[in-house]
């Protein structure tokens, strides 16, 4: 179709009430909600492709999708789309890109934040893992987080049957800090992530912070690529996708 143009949609969403990004049968997804809004606005079926999947309850502070549309968009498209979308999804901008650009496959770096609070706080509970009544050794957690940068294979931190044999990725950052009393943020950046990888890393860091898993045990498992004991999946609500990088975009925050 000669008039077909490719657009990038930049957005954010609160994942609390969604089954995740991707369309799922008989469940409300972020993708499906945006497609329904575009279909309503343009009065014919519209499809979009996201930069990656997020699981049920995971949030995205910054997210990209691409959309093919036959026509030129006016300056009011974001305003109109946001008026249709629920308050849990916000479209920041929509802009034309070259037809070969793909929101998923051209992303070169993804950054996640995971939030943990160790005192009960009703204002954080939907967007941070509430882990009360426990003291965490931040020094041990920070050491393990930093040492993850030494590895490119992550078999101990994934569920292999979900990955079809894929166990590697390239980490660019991995650090945890206390951003205010009893409130922690873990940051990790990579070229790609394996299924539930970040939530398993956080589960491991919590065990290390509680001194239920030693640094030596962590190192031995990573060096030998053998399973770690006791690791649980940290809850989804603490996880936020915060940044996506593309080689052809200026990544100013909006």
Image (cartoon, rainbow, N blue to C red):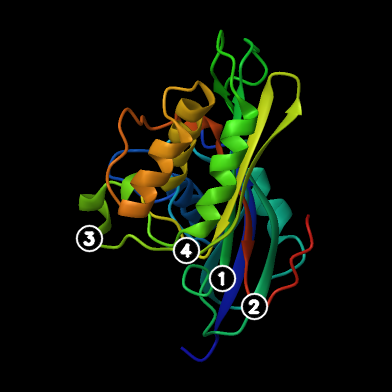
Instruction: Give the camera-side residue of 151 and 42.
Output: 151
What residue is disc 3 on?
A: 164
What residue is disc 1 on?
A: 108
Q: Is residue 61 left or right of residue 105?
A: right
Tell me the CA gap for discs 4 and 3: 26 Å
User: Residue 216 at x, y = what percent?
Assistant: 43, 38
What residue is disc 2 on?
A: 247
Instruction: Compare marks 2 and 3 and give the one earlier in the sequence.
Output: 3
Where 84 falls versus 182 (above or below)?
Answer: below
Location of residue 163 by image quarter: bottom left
Pair 2/4: label in front? 2
What residue is disc 4 on?
A: 48
Instruction: Compare marks 2 and 1 and give the one earlier in the sequence.
Output: 1
Instruction: Compare marks 4 and 1 and give the one earlier in the sequence.
Output: 4
User: Residue 145 at x, y = what percent?
Assistant: 56, 44
Tell me the CA gap for discs 2 and 3: 28 Å
Tell me the CA gap for discs 2 and 4: 21 Å
Tell me the CA gap for discs 2 and 1: 7 Å
Can residue 57 be seen from the camera position used here?
no
Q: Is residue 235 left or right of residue 144?
A: left
Location of residue 122 by image quarter: top right
User: Residue 253 at x, y = what percent?
Assistant: 78, 56
Q: What label sits on residue 190 in the rendered view?
A: none
Tell me the quadrant of the picture where the C terminus can be found.
Answer: bottom right
Instruction: Report the residue that reaches farthest toward the front.
Output: 216
Does dot 3 land on a helix, a strand or a loop? Answer: loop
Instruction: Kindly indicate whether the residue at mark 1 contacts the one at mark 2 (C-beta within 8 angstroms).
Output: yes
């Amino acid at each position: 179709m000669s008039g077909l143009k490719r657009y990038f949609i930049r957005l954010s969403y609160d994942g609390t009430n969604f089954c995740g990004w991707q369309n799922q049968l008989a469940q409300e997804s972020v993708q499906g909600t945006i497609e329904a809004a575009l279909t309503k606005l343009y009065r014919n079926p519209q499809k979009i492709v996201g930069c990656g999947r997020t699981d049920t309850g995971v949030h995205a502070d910054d997210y990209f999708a691409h959309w093919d549309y036959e026509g030129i968009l006016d300056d009011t498209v974001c305003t109109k789309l946001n008026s249709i979308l629920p308050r849990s999804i916000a479209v920041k901008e929509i802009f034309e890109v070259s037809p070969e650009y793909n929101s998923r496959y051209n992303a070169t770096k993804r950054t996640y934040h995971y939030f943990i609070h160790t005192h009960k706080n009703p204002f954080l509970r939907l967007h941070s893992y509430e882990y009360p009544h426990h003291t965490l050794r931040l020094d041990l957690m920070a050491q393990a987080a930093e040492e993850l940068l030494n590895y490119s294979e992550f078999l101990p931190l994934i569920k292999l049957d979900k990955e079809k044999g894929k166990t590697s990725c390239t980490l660019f950052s991995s650090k945890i800090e206390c951003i205010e009393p009893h409130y922690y943020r873990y940051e990790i950046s990579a070229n790609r992530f394996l299924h539930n990888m970040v939530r398993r890393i956080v589960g491991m860091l919590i065990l290390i912070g509680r001194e239920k898993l030693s640094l030596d045990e962590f190192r031995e498992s990573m060096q030998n690529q053998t399973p770690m004991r006791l690791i649980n999946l940290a809850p989804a609500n603490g996880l936020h996708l915060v940044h996506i990088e593309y080689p052809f975009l200026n990544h100013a925050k909006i």
